[in-house]
């Protein structure tokens, strides 16, 4: 094991903060500041600082597990586990057809693994049934961005632009808890004289930093954006020249907005007319301004239209494609951006190509060495795929996801998973979903492998291997290589991540998310490269069709032209040949056929489930600073559990008084889908008609037992952020004192000890 510091990146959120890792003599790993990375400049949140805790042998899986005849997961050899997976997947395909096999991925997979998983599903299994948990992250923003701009990249500008803007409207993001190191950009914005407006039903830690906080009723962000656009029009603040020269579709969008007058919007949202007018003034007066959305407006059954309304506001005021201005989405998962660009999403091929585009199919099929007609068409979206388990889909291969905790209507999804003929899970830990599997494969994690991720800015980064994985652990790439061979595909699934990335470059060349000009060498020497970054068409110059805004149409010059293009400072050549990457999109034109952005007319509509007499309160969900996503990893870190040991229900004092509930009293939250129980947290920081629950925990306090799987018609995003519930007081003695985190750790410790004991016994028998 090396003892020098390795520069790499955090495994958690889409900031992908830079850090240094150094193995220590006692076998642990030390995290230290990496100030050269511009996204976090050395700062780390508690999750990042404690990330190496999950590398410990006593926390993670180190042996394959196979369910025996008695229904117990027991240790097995790798050959036994892989043979069983291959046999079960083959049986399912033979008996029910290829689409009876499903594949479910994760936004934490590296680009190389996400790319290979999509290829594995379509080439080896021949199934269309593949999607990933990133569908639950920012699919609505992606759909709206493509409609408006012709291209989706979370942020079309680097984070460093935020402090230089005149005003930022932050919609539905509590980044002080979800992405703490990013808060400095907004602090600097205010220090520079800019204005921060936060829109959130709760007065979060982020909202406390705002110059103006608007607290709309959950599910009404669409009406709010339309009301603001109405005022922009009524007050003569439309940038008429910009609209005329750089956009299309304004008249229809204008008419839709004019139907949402301020008093009407006040009644829908609860945001007063004076606050609406002040928001418009603060946003329109500076020369530059931005709107940034996150899960709040996106995780709705009308999320695409909601984000589209905020984009319309930006377009009407002339913001997108201008310096220090525009619209952006704050991606959540670590590789949520790259994870959907390269093929694990139901309708996409590598390079952000569409699966139903014949030209895209031909290009990717040629790289893969298969017939384009052999590639299946688009499959089900994430929730629809999970909902089909045990019926249309009989076997499932799942990587890096924990839908038993993270999916909406989670109790139903848990039952669908249990009804499968066969489930195989690749994970670092024995998550709640892995515990239901027939085979569990222990795989390497962030610090034990090299690979690339793409952060929320579209900055492609190189995570470097810093430590050696424990014996008995293999990478996801090795898993897919071995399974492909067992299923009759001997070639095309390399285990070396750089070799995979070289193929990804060729597959993405000329696509919207063009990585063909990016190499591991460049990433090792630079602080990331922004896509699109096409390869040079020839040694002396940039690719054909290059434009300064980065919207490039590059011809594929073959493998030799794509490999190891010289860096800009390479003394071996006289003229630049490597594309520098594209930090800022749309400066000259948008990625549409005519270069114009599109207004999309939208109108307010209610949430899929409005409160009524039986369920009179709205539930909204979110995260806390010390836990991450389903908590599968963070709930194994003692320091994080001490800070956030279990679920809670955030309740306004007036609502608590009506229920007769005091601080810490157990409260049942009941929806049409189920019941969750957690302690009350009484606070004025939430609306009286709304309650909040974090979604990191399984068991009795599982928030996603309650959430509504109503889907956005375009993005297929479930409506996590608003559902109707009722509250019931619960006697304290009916609630176990031990926290969910403690229960989880205790259960998994018992499983791990059993696995280790049986492994030792097996080895002893083999030795005899």
Image (tube, rainbow, N blue to C red):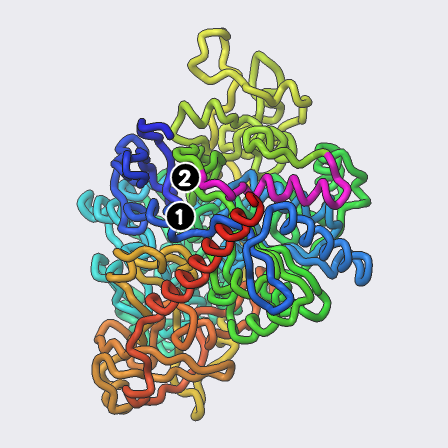
Q: Quadrant of the N terminus?
A: top left
Total numbered badges shown on the rendered structure: 2
Q: Which mark is residue 447?
A: 2
The reply to whether residue 249 is in sight is no
How many angstroms separate mark 2 from mark 1 (CA)? 14 Å
Frontmost of labels 2 and 1 is 1
Q: Which mark is residue 57?
A: 1
Label 1: few (<14), some (14–19) or many (≥20) C-alpha neighbours in 10 Å? few
Look at the image and say whether residue 655 sits in the magenta stretch.
no
Q: Earlier in the sequence, mark 2 or mark 1?
A: 1
| Quadrant hosting residue 16 | top left
Give the percent coordinates (x, y) of residue 362.
76, 38
In percent of the image, x 36 and y 28: which residue is there?
2
Foreground: 268 or 690? 690
The reply to whether residue 698 is in sight is yes
Q: Quadrant of the C terminus?
A: top right
The correct choice, above or below, for 472 with respect to 607 in the image is above
In percent of the image, x 25 and y 76: which residue is there?
681
Give the percent coordinates (x, y) of residue 269.
37, 74
The correct choice, above or below, for 299 with respect to 495 in the image is below
Q: Find numbered disc 2 in the image and state the secondary structure of the residue it sits on.
A: helix
Look at the image and say whether residue 487 sits in the magenta stretch.
yes
Give the percent coordinates (x, y) of residue 734.
33, 87
In percent of the image, x 22 and y 75: which residue is there?
683
Q: Which mark is residue 223?
A: none
Q: Find numbered disc 1 in the image and state the secondary structure of the residue it sits on.
A: loop
In the image, the segment drawn in magenta is 469-490
| Quadrant hosting residue 709 | bottom right
Give the percent coordinates (x, y) of residue 686.
28, 74
* Residue 101 relative to residue 719: left or right: right
């Amino acid at each position: 094991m090396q003892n020098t510091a390795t520069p790499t990146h955090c495994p958690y959120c889409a900031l992908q903060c830079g850090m240094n890792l150094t193995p220590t003599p006692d076998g642990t790993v030390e995290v230290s500041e990496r100030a050269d990375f511009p996204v976090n400049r050395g700062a780390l949140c508690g999750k990042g600082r404690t990330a190496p805790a999950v590398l410990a042998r006593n926390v993670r899986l180190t042996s394959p597990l196979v369910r025996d005849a008695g229904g117990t997961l027991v240790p097995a050899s790798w050959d036994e586990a892989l043979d069983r997976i291959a046999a079960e997947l083959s049986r399912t395909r033979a008996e029910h057809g290829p689409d009876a096999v499903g594949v479910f991925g994760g936004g934490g997979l590296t680009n190389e693994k996400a790319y290979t998983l999509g290829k594995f599903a379509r080439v080896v299994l021949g199934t269309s049934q593949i999607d990933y948990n990133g569908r639950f992250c920012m699919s609505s923003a992606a759909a709206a961005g493509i409609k408006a701009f012709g291209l989706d990249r979370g942020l079309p500008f680097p984070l460093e632009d935020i402090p230089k803007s005149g005003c930022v409207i932050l919609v539905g993001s509590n980044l002080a808890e979800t992405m703490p190191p990013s808060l400095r950009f907004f602090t600097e914005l205010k220090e520079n004289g800019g204005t921060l407006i936060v829109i959130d039903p709760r007065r979060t830690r982020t909202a406390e930093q705002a110059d103006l906080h608007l607290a709309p009723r959950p599910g009404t962000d669409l009406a709010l954006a339309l009301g603001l656009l109405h005022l922009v029009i009524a007050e003569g603040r439309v940038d008429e020249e910009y609209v005329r020269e750089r956009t299309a579709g304004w008249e229809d969008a204008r008419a839709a907005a004019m139907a949402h007058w301020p008093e009407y919007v006040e009644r829908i949202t609860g945001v007063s007319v004076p606050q609406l007018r002040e928001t418009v003034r603060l946003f329109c007066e500076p020369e530059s301004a931005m709107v940034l959305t996150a899960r709040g407006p996106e995780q709705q059954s009308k999320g695409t239209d909601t984000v589209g309304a905020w984009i319309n506001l930006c377009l009407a005021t002339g913001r997108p494609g201008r310096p220090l201005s525009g619209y952006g989405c704050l991606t959540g998962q670590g590789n949520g951006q790259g994870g959907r660009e390269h093929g694990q999403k139901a309708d996409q091929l590598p390079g952000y190509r569409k699966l139903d585009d014949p030209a895209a199919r031909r290009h990717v099929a040629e790289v893969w060495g298969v017939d384009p007609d052999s590639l299946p068409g688009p499959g089900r979206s994430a929730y629809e795929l999970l909902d089909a388990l045990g019926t249309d889909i009989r076997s499932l291969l799942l990587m890096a996801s924990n839908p038993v905790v993270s999916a909406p209507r989670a109790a139903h999804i848990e039952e669908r998973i249990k009804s499968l003929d066969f489930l195989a899970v690749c994970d670092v830990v024995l998550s709640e979903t892995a515990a239901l599997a027939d085979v569990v494969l222990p795989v390497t994690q962030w610090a034990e492998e090299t690979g690339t991720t793409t952060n929320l800015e579209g900055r492609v980064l190189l995570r470097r291997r810093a430590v050696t994985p424990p014996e008995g652990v293999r990478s996801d790439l090795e898993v897919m290589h071995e399974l492909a061979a067992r299923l009759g595909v001997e070639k095309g699934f390399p285990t070396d991540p750089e070799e995979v990335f070289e193929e990804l470059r060729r597959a993405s060349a000329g696509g919207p998310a063009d990585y063909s000009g990016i190499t591991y060498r460049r990433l090792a020497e630079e602080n990331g490269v922004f896509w699109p970054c096409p390869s040079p068409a020839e040694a002396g110059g940039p690719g054909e069709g290059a434009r300064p805004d980065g919207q490039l149409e590059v011809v594929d010059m073959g493998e030799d032209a794509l490999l190891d293009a010289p860096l800009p400072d390479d003394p071996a050549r006289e003229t630049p040949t490597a594309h520098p990457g594209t930090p800022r999109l749309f400066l000259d034109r948008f990625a549409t056929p005519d270069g114009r952005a599109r207004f999309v007319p939208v109108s307010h509509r209610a949430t899929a489930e409005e409160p009524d007499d039986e369920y009179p309160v709205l539930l909204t969900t979110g995260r806390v600073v010390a836990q991450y996503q389903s908590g599968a990893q963070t709930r194994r870190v003692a320091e994080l559990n001490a800070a956030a040991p279990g679920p809670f229900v955030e309740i306004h004092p007036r609502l608590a008084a009506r229920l007769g509930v005091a601080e810490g009293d157990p409260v049942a939250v009941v929806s049409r889908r189920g019941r969750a129980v957690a302690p009350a947290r009484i606070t004025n920081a939430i609306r009286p008609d709304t309650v909040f629950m974090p979604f990191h925990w399984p068991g009795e306090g599982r928030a996603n037992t309650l959430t509504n799987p109503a889907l956005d018609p375009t993005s297929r995003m479930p409506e996590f952020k608003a559902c109707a519930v009722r509250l019931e007081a619960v006697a304290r003695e009916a609630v176990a004192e031990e926290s969910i985190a403690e229960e989880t750790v205790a259960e998994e410790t018992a499983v791990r000890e059993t696995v280790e004991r049986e492994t030792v016994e097996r080895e002893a028998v083999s030795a005899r």
